[in-house]
């Protein structure tokens, strides 16, 4: 009988392991009872039997990157326990040799991951169900890759710790173990905090699993969407998912003239030249396939594989009694371009369009009206997956021609709208063009004309526009702005973001350093409160903290004087700190021998471990944060003043 099956399972816990050459530790936190369990494998404290007995009680373990690291090691221990027990009994293996075997397995697992491999255990072989928050949040994607330590800083976790002892150490003593266990527990509790923040994402996955019978608990949003589309398509065409998963449409080249919609037409020379450019190009690699700009009536439009972009000069733009700012976004631009124009992935055929429309878009509308939000959210993921995965060679949706047809036509359709509005509305000011929408400032007296022109465009394209009126826009560039709707809602983008998000979801992988700065800037532009007033009145020390990460090519050191003696202290790989009046100089040392000052000209206080004080006792250098706030403000206001003269 398998060792894990010997006893009824009943425990669900957040867990983490530490694998060192002469010590192994396991820590978990029971999410139902709050009980902490810890086990040590050391030559002088060997608790393998207790660990195995504990694991027998586990029906589920929650971790961070546990599918690719922690669980393969645990699986290895479970599988080898009986063998080790016999060898120990016969004096053929020592405790230290077992620990070294576990360590070597861990190093092998890391090496496979570093080479882009998948050391995880096959799902059918997994002995204890795993929930991996690293995968749920798609932090295994190279563009989102985030360590637990970095996550701790983003979450304002009180204690950001590095392992106190080298994993290579062969002489760990019993006196060293408490510090290792403290570190181990700190990671577990940080993971538990992230687990609580993941509640909605986990609940959605459970609901999708129950509704659609898709084992998606550890899937990213995009993989859920892809899997749901695969299920719906296979059911519609009556083919096995396994057969469909292997399908791809490879393209040596894409003649753009072949994928352009025939109703795309322009009146101006500038945009007809643009259209001619697209008709002339042949795409052989979709990554950075093209980059083109067009200037029309003083406004520059940029075109690329990521969509259309354009932005007015930095400044403050406001609605008033005579003018109004209106933003028009295309509802579900990419899905609707495909549906309305019968675009499909070649190896899946036109049936895909019908599934897209009736099985997903229309069903999502029904689910939203019925307030079946889990179904609505699942179908939204499926709808969004098709375009994104159509350029992924590992997906059954792969057809780069579909990708290019969607994005290029989408950009040109928005350009048609921009040209129409610019040509026909007197005194129109083009403010932004951004992926799926156009923002303009127009005379209020021409609003009826504006909406008529938009309706005419909708009739031509079969797309639908959604409108938002802004009372004020504070713009640095197309990727960094603040917009206030006429209902008082504030939209933040880029450097203006107070809380980092993607859509409506927290983006913990983004750097939230010195949050007080965008907060002060927001208060200034939305409420007229001076940055110094916001900053000096603020009492959350975490909002004054910055994050600095070091990799294998660099390390951090702080330099300071103590009793007139120069002290240099090494820092951990992920450092939380704030700018202080007194403190240390923070220096980045590169392995090639060069150095770089961090926040040059300012002293810092390292704040990896939270210390509770009155805000006045932290010795914050308010001048730094005030200066950083005014840097953002002055870029906008100075440019705004220049435009007035």
Image (cartoon, helix red, strand yellow):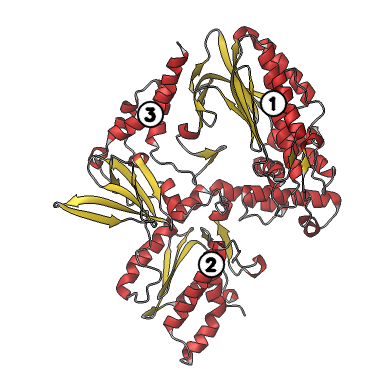
Q: Quadrant of the C terminus?
A: top left
**Residue 613 image position (x, y, % from top left):** 26, 44
The tag earlier along the polypeptide, 2 or 1, is 2
State the CA–CA distance, disc 2 to disc 1: 47 Å
Residue at numbered disc 3: 631
- Give the camera-side residue of 518 and 297: 297
Horizontal arrangement in the rendering, residue 360 relative to residue 371 (left or right): right
N-terminal label among 3 and 1 = 1
Q: In this rendering, is residue 359 above or below 528?
A: below
- Residue 598 placement, left or right of 341: left
| Helix, strand or loop for disc 3 | helix
Please tell me which residue lies in front, 253 or 417. Answer: 253
Look at mark 1 in the image and give the residue it sits on.
Answer: 414
Which residue is pictured at 54% across the width and 84% down the height? Answer: 83
Disc 2 marks which residue? 111
- CA gap between label 2 and label 3 equals 44 Å
Q: Secondary structure at mark 2?
A: helix
On the image, the x and y values in percent for residue 198 come to: 53, 49
């Amino acid at each position: 009988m398998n060792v894990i099956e010997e006893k009824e399972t009943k425990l669900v816990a957040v867990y983490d392991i530490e694998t060192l050459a002469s010590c192994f530790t396991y820590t978990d936190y029971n999410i139902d009872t709050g009980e902490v369990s810890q086990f040590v494998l050391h030559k002088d404290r060997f608790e393998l039997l207790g660990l195995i007995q504990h694991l027998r009680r586990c029906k589920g373990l929650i971790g961070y990157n546990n599918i690719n690291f922690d669980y393969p090691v645990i699986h290895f221990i479970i599988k080898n326990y009986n063998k080790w027990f016999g060898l120990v009994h016969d004096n053929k293996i020592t405790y230290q040799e077992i620990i070294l075997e576990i360590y070597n397995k861990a190093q092998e697992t890391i090496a496979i991951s570093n080479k882009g491999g998948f050391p995880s255990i096959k799902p059918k072989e997994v002995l204890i169900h795993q929930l991996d928050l690293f995968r749920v949040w798609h932090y295994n994607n190279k563009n989102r890759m985030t360590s637990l330590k970095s996550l701790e800083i983003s979450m304002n976790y009180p204690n950001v710790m590095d392992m106190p002892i080298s994993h290579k150490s062969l002489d760990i003593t019993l006196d060293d173990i408490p510090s290792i266990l403290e570190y181990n527990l700190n990671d577990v509790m940080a993971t538990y905090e992230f687990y609580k923040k993941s509640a909605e994402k986990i609940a959605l996955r459970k609901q999708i699993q129950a509704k659609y019978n898709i084992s998606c608990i550890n899937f990213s949003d995009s993989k859920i969407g892809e899997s749901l589309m695969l299920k719906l398509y296979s059911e519609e065409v009556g083919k096995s998912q396994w057969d469909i998963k292997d399908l791809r449409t490879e393209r040596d080249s894409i003649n753009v003239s072949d994928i352009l919609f025939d109703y795309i037409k322009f009146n101006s020379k500038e945009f007809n030249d643009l259209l001619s450019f697209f008709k002339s190009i042949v795409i052989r690699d979709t990554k950075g396939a093209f980059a083109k700009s067009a200037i029309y009536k003083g406004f520059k439009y940029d075109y690329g594989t990521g969509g259309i972009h354009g932005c007015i000069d930095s400044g403050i733009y406001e609605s008033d009694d005579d003018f109004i700012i209106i933003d028009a976004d295309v509802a579900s631009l990419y899905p609707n371009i495909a549906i309305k124009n019968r675009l499909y992935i070649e190896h899946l055929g036109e049936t895909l369009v019908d599934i897209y429309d009736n099985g997903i878009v229309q069903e999502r509308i029904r689910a939203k009206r019925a307030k079946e939000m889990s179904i609505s959210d699942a179908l939204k993921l499926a709808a969004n997956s098709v375009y994104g995965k159509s350029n992924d060679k590992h997906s059954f949706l792969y057809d780069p021609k579909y990708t290019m047809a969607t994005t290029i036509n989408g950009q040109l359709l928005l350009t048609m709208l921009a040209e129409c509005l610019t040509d026909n509305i007197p005194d129109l000011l083009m403010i932004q063009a951004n992926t799926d929408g156009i923002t303009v400032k127009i005379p209020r007296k021409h609003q009826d004309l504006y909406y008529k022109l938009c309706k005419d465009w909708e009739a031509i394209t079969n797309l639908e526009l959604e409108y938002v009126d802004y009372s004020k826009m504070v713009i640095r560039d197309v990727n960094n702005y603040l917009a206030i709707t006429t209902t008082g809602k504030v939209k933040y983008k880029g450097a203006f973001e107070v809380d980092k998000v993607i859509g409506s979801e927290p983006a913990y992988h983004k750097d939230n350093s010195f949050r007080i700065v965008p907060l002060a800037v927001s208060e200034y532009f939305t409420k007229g409160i001076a940055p110094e007033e916001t900053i000096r009145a603020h009492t959350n020390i975490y909002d004054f903290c910055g994050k600095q990460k070091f990799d294998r090519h660099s390390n951090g050191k702080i330099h300071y004087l103590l009793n007139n003696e120069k002290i240099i202290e090494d820092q951990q790989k992920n450092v939380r700190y704030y700018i202080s009046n007194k403190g240390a100089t923070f220096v980045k040392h590169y392995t090639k021998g060069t150095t770089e000052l961090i926040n040059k000209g300012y002293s810092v206080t390292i704040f990896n471990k939270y210390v509770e004080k009155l805000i006045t006792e932290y010795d914050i250098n308010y001048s730094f944060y005030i200066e950083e706030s005014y840097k953002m403000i002055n870029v906008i206001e100075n440019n705004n003043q220049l435009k007035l003269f």
